[in-house]
Image (cartoon, grey):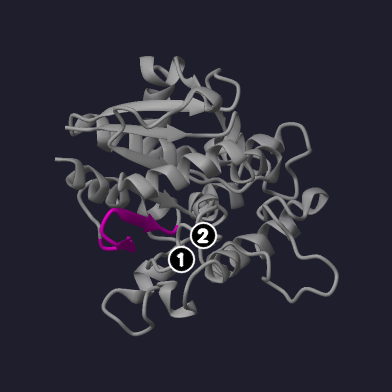
Amino acid sequence: MGTVLIPIPDRDFDPTEVAVSWRVLTRNGHRVVFATQSGAPGVADEIMVSGRGLDVWSALPVLSAIPMIGLMLRANRDGRSAYRDMLASNEFQHPIAWAQAGLGGIDALLLPGGHRARGMRSYIDSDLLHRLVVEAFNRGIVVAAICHGVLLAARSVDPETGRSVLYGRKTTALTWAMERLAWRLTRVTRFWDRNYYRTYTEEPGQPGGYMSVQAEVTRALEDSTDFCDVVRGSPGWRRKSSGMARDTATDSRPAFVVDDGNYVSARWPGDTHTFATVLSRKLN
């Protein structure tokens, strides 16, 4: 059994990617250590927990409690259940601070995601975490990253090489197709906060999608073909690419996970059971 360090932001992380990973790992006998920026327990993106706040009527009394779009995008029953259980756990209630986090006694580093810029930027842009990720890769510790957690890894540049730790690696991450679909939907329904689903947006003169997770991660790689996605027409590609079907503890068919030795990556919350299971098996 192994010990897994999971750094998260103080707020706005994705509840499924953190909590389902925690549940899979702990049920398989692994120890989880959480680290937050402040050293206090973190709080997930509430919209991804409740689903409230993504409909055009979300600002209206009474109607705000009736989500529709939010039901499509929020954590599903498994994710919400795991999140409730995780909140009550001793390890989640007693995290360490990023500044105290080290890799002594750590067997794996898990980088979850989330998209809301308010909380996630401090995580993705953290020099402390960048150095931790570089050290993990250099030590050969297993690193697992999902969704925007892959972006954190991509931005972690080894000072010895001047290159991202993902240079020369095969990886996936939140695809532009998935990110764009959710963004286009929520920028209409959540019209007062049109970029809720984009952590980083394009500057004037940059083409559409230039600051998407997929585009930025791809720019950090040795070759653009090192970014992996479900091949159109391959078995199960519609299910895997729909953005609607999510994996479960007993059904990995909707998931897409890239295993590159001591580095594992996945795209979005719908891959999390399979993603965490692959990591767990590497620690056995």
The residue sitting at the right extreme is: 204
Q: Distance between the residues labelled 1 and 2?
A: 5 Å
- Residue at image point 52% right, 20% down: 41
Task: Give the camera-side residue of 221 and 6.
Answer: 221
Quarter of the figure that contains the C terminus: top left
Picture layout, residue 103 above or below residue 271: above
Task: Give the camera-side residue of 21 and 100.
Answer: 100
Q: Do the residues labelled 1 and 2 touch (CB within 8 Å)?
A: yes
The residue sitting at the bottom extreme is: 233
Picture layout, residue 182 above or below residue 24: below
Residue type for callout 1:
Tyr
Task: Give the camera-side residue of 13 and 163.
Answer: 163
Q: Is residue 78 visible?
A: no
Q: Position of residue 189 (x, y in %)?
A: 72, 55
Residue type for callout 2:
Ser
Instruction: Residue under label 1, please give it.
Output: 167
Report crowding for label 1: few under 14, some 14 to 19, many 20 or more residues within 10 A (C-alpha).
many
Q: Bounds of the magenta span?
A: 253-267
Q: Position of residue 265 (x, y in %)?
A: 38, 57
Q: Residue 164 carries which label?
A: 2
